Amino acid sequence: MLKRKLLRDIRGSLGAYIALISVLVIGLMLYVSMALTLDSLVISKDNYYRDYQLADGFARITRGPAGLVADLEDIRGIDKAVGRIVLDVLVNKPAGEETTTIRLVSFEERQPLNRFKLEQGKVPTGEVREILVTPAFLKGNNYQIGDQIPLIIKGREVRFTISGTANSPEYVYEIPNGFTLAPNPKAFGIALVPYSAIGPVLDMEGQVNDIAFSLNKGTEFLDVKTQASRVLNSYGMTSIYPVKDQLSYSMLSQEITGLEGSAKTSPMIFLLVAASVLYIMLRRMVEQQRGQIGVMKAFGFTDWEIINHYMGYALFIGTLGGLGGSVVGTVLSYYWVELYKVYYNIPDFTARVSLTYLLVGTLLSLLFSLFAGWRGCRRVMALSPAEALRPPAPPAGKKTMVERVRFLWGVLNTQAKMVVRNVFRNKPRAFLVILGVSCSFAMMVSSRASFDSTYYLIRYQFGEVERYDIKVTLNQYIDRVKGVNDSRNIDGVAGAEPMLEVPVTLSNRWLQKDIVITGLPQNSRLYRLVSAEGKHIDLPDNGLVISNQLAKTLEIQPGEVVTIKPFLGDRREEKVVVRQVVPQYVGLGAYMDIDALGALIHEPSSTSSILLSVDRSEMDQVRKDLQEGRNVGVIYDKNRMKQQFEDLMESYNATQYILIFFAFITGFAIVYNVNIISLSERERELSTLMVLGMTEREVARILAFEQGFLGLVAVIVGIPLGYGMLYAIVNGTASDIYNMPLRIEPVSFLISSLGAAAFLVAAQWRIKGRIAKLSMIEVLKENE
Amino acid sequence: METIIRTQNLRKTFYTGEIPVHALKGVDLEIGEGEFVVILGPSGSGKSTLLNILGGMDAPTEGEIFYRGKPLQNMNKKELTMFRRNAVGFIFQFYNLMPNLTALENVTLAAEITNDPLEPRKVLAEMGLAEREDHFPSQLSGGEQQRVAIARAITKNPDILLCDEPTGALDYETGKQVLDALRNFNRDLGKTVLVITHNAAIGNMGDKVVYIKDGRVDRIKINPNPVSASEVSW
């Protein structure tokens, strides 16, 4: 019979229950979908790395005999080593089409490390010019197996036939460098090519320029770094790094860390909100149904039976919310996985239905609900039947702190005074409203702001810092003056500047980092250093300007001295003063005067890249001309990159609005439920006001002012909270490759405030309907 | 003496569940300006229903009711609210004060929404509550709370004061104080006061006593020499 009462009570305030259950569903949906996706991602990744033997360390050399791997394998701690030829080449395409760079990675039969997974077609034998490309690259460029790709190698066209598709654990995230944030198969792809097919083409038979090695169990990368470097230095080593710094690996790790953080935090906000609302709802219900409880007790129901009844509400909500959220979350995880598969090439990465998470999700929901329910209704036990049948003690009026501010209190009219006292009347509840609204506001702010931050980054990086149109990275150092002049002679090139990039180890005391120092000419127009305040910074004649992330990593302040050890030249260590720290959001940058940097490696007049400014109308022709250049490695079209970035952000836009919508629902659920509760507590007061001659509108206005006041406080609290959330997001995703600026545009605060105002008004609007239904006569006839 | 309220064949039927309850079965009544009217009847006789309709809180099912010649049954919600706001003061058995406003603030609240209010502090002082104006309802006795409620009704300076069992929850002495205050309002300002009660002794105070029985006016007694509150006893 009590069950029937439960169902009727729920039907009686269906709106409040639906709102509450929605919040639970959102929380669990997020949790289950992210946890499931994370699980699948981690398992598939681990299996992939293990089954295809991803190496533990990598090194890049200028050129060396293939036999050097044996020297490496002799080092204690190194298990296996392989030498490869890795080279970026351009696809020969007609003018007007996007420049495509292909990274040729050589392989040998029965290679012990970095094995690839053949997806389609057949493995090239090496007798003819055949390559394997990734499925993403094949699809993205509308190639078919059997098609020929014309590559420009050493200034002439060499055609390779696509014999099949394959994925490599080394290129799960298929990007050319850390400045590229998302894969774009039209611009970059990996091609696996038999060593015997590529060696002769490059005049590198019997030689390699890239090393991968694995470590024995229990050995750390640092244990072998020095010895391996000693072997490789004689072959012009330019970098040596552990797998955790390998680009694709670290991008994926970063993604996993971020997803882990989100899976742990954001659902909890929703669950906590739902639990708090449920708590006050049940607490109120027990208070309101005192009489009924008294009657039940008088009839001889035990405390336990009555509590059981009230816990039934929690159970109902928890089960429905939990199951609903888990099921929707499971479905959503399929969508997440598909989204991930667009960017990450992981074979056998699929979403799965997991009974465990269905169970965990439902249990989590029940845990929160039952705990809140228990806290809400345990006072049932304290009531004796006779006491329960008596009405509760009347609410005592009290002066509030605000009244101490005499002059302020004096100006308020009585209605306003009532509003203020009501706000302070139930402090825990006011606190809950403020907490809920500010969380929801902060969620709106932070989800908008992650876009603000990224767009700021785009504006800063592509608008302020990188002023060029095309960056041509050369396959080898060339003479600076000649390179610049040759480039200027290309039709359509308006300006050209050199850029010297030197890989070095930068160290401060025991802290060190392998980075690339960028050498720029004085007063460079095409690449400018810009301070956090947006001011143009002059490059010092000597000394370094470094990025803030690098300064943090090396714990260094401007004015202090760091040690530079280049990977090139005679590798002599030198001390250099850090002159200034600049913001940089992509990569770990360090900048120096190009002459000073050249002197450091005894290449006083060399350059490794050329920056070009190009007339828009001549762009296609310039790119075409550059493709044919002999030493041209990568042609990087900044504007296209910028566009790609913006498109990527555009595609995430929906996510932003979904999150804002979730925040909105949550805010609404809190405000609406709390309003309903306040209203039921105050029916008598409000009816009295109407009898006194106040219109429904005036009565509703009193409640609206209360909510408005709390809302205003919540928004004020929400501003630092929003910054906090964004800071947590930024910090959680910061890495050597990418650190997001902390940026919230005023318009985001505005939109979020409007969002908060919207759910306050929506909740208020529902309340107004309830006020209209208040019956003055019935309410006032009752005893207090 | 001008008629302030007149009803004609006033009927009210409630439908609780499926059984219709006829609370008023055709009430004809005339109340003059400045009269002190006592409506007497046992519980369930329909007197509260009558009061609610007279005060514009409820609409009759049938029949007519005129306030200064204007038909209340034709007024919309807004007009009824304005009628309650400016013309009527209510006093209940349970005082229905705002718990989080002080005595003075409770009175001021009513004054703030009315066109031509009396000075709240003065009204409160007349009720003998000058010392208690900063107290919250929970800090006042029942009699004090009821006097605050009366002050709240009076401060609106209404033409007619409707009181539903105003002494019902009070002890004997306090009850008499409250009645005295009502009588004073009637005498001093010439305002109409309507008191509903089942306490026959209070009938002696009225200029006119209306006996309600089973949803109808049973009889009306004109009292040429009404007594003061101090002379009433029960």
Image (cartoon, coloured by chain):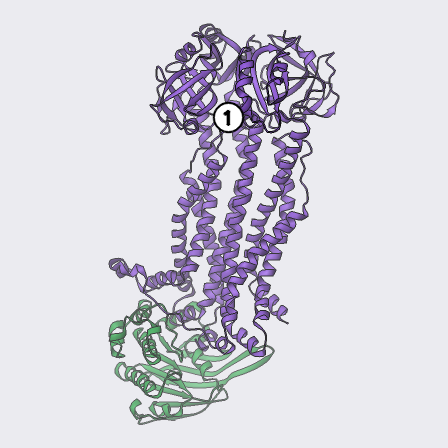
Chain colours: A purple, B green
Q: How many marks?
A: 1
Quarter of the image where one finds residue A87: top right
Q: Is there any visible trace of residue A285 in the rendered image? A: yes
Q: Position of residue A570 (x, y in %)?
A: 47, 10
Q: Is residue A295 above or below residue A334?
A: below
Q: Position of residue B192 (x, y in %)?
A: 33, 82
Amino acid under label 1? Lys
Name the residue tied to disc 1.
A642
Query: What SS does tag 1 mark?
Result: helix
Query: Image point 36% across, 90% down: which residue?
Result: B202
Which chain does tag 1 point to? A
On screen, A452 above or below A163? Answer: below
Bin the neighbour count of mark 1 within 10 Å (Cα to Cα): few under 14, some 14-19, many 20 and up: some
Q: Quadrant of the N terminus of chain B?
A: bottom left
Q: Write down the quadrant of residue B124 in the picture.
A: bottom left
Residue A712 at x, y percent in the picture: 39, 52
In the image: residue A117, left or right of residue B137:
right
Q: Residue at x 36, y 15 (%)?
A: A542
Q: Where does the image place residue A88, in percent across and percent down from the top left?
A: 59, 16
Judging depth in this view, the residue of A308 and A692 nearest the camera is A308
Q: Between residue B41 and residue A262, name the one nearer to us.
A: A262
Residue at x 29% of width, y 90% of height? B230
Splitting the image into 4 quarters, where does residue B83 fall? bottom left
- Quick one: which residue is furthest to the front in this view? A76
